[in-house]
Image: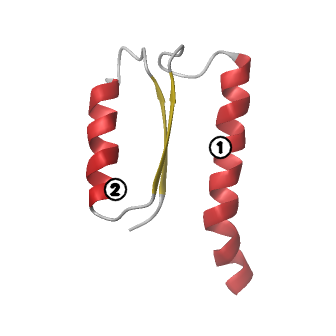
Amino acid sequence: KAPLFVAQGANDPRVNKAESDQMVAALKARGIDVEYMVKDNEGHGFHNQENRFDFYRGMISFLDKHMKPAVEKK
């Protein structure tokens, strides 16, 4: 039920991108709000500085979207 933010390096030797694609598609098919970020030039972990910035911006946006309404209700 909870929204999910998934970040994937396309060249990750541990977590196969095709498996992440399947998981994201299955969750979306169940109506789960999933934001999916894929960086083509990354492996397991984001090492490129610009990719890190994109990840942090995406994560902040995701948290703002999903956490602020819960905090404001209190």
Residue at image position (68%, 85%) is 73
Residue at the limit of the structure toward the bottom, as seen here: 74
Query: Percent position (x, y) of residue 31?
Result: 34, 65
- The N terminus lies in which quarter of the figure? bottom left
Other-residue count near label 2 (Cα within 10 Å), few / some / many at <14 / 14–19 / ≥20: few
Residue 74 shows in this picture:
no
Residue named by callout 1: 58
- Mark earlier in primary sequence (1, 2): 2
- The C terminus lies in which quarter of the figure? bottom right
Pointer 1 with pointer 2, Cβ within 8 A = no
Residue 66 picture quarter: bottom right
Horizontal side of 23 relative to 72 (left or right) equals left
Q: Identify the element where label 2 is drawn.
A: helix
Horizontal side of 58 relative to 18 (left or right) equals right
Residue 65 shows in this picture:
yes
Query: Percent position (x, y) of residue 36?
Result: 48, 42
The amino acid type found where label 2 is placed reads Lys
The amino acid type found where label 1 is placed reads Gly
Query: Percent position (x, y) of residue 54?
Result: 68, 33
Residue at image position (65%, 66%) is 67
Mark drawn on residue 45: none
Residue named by callout 2: 28
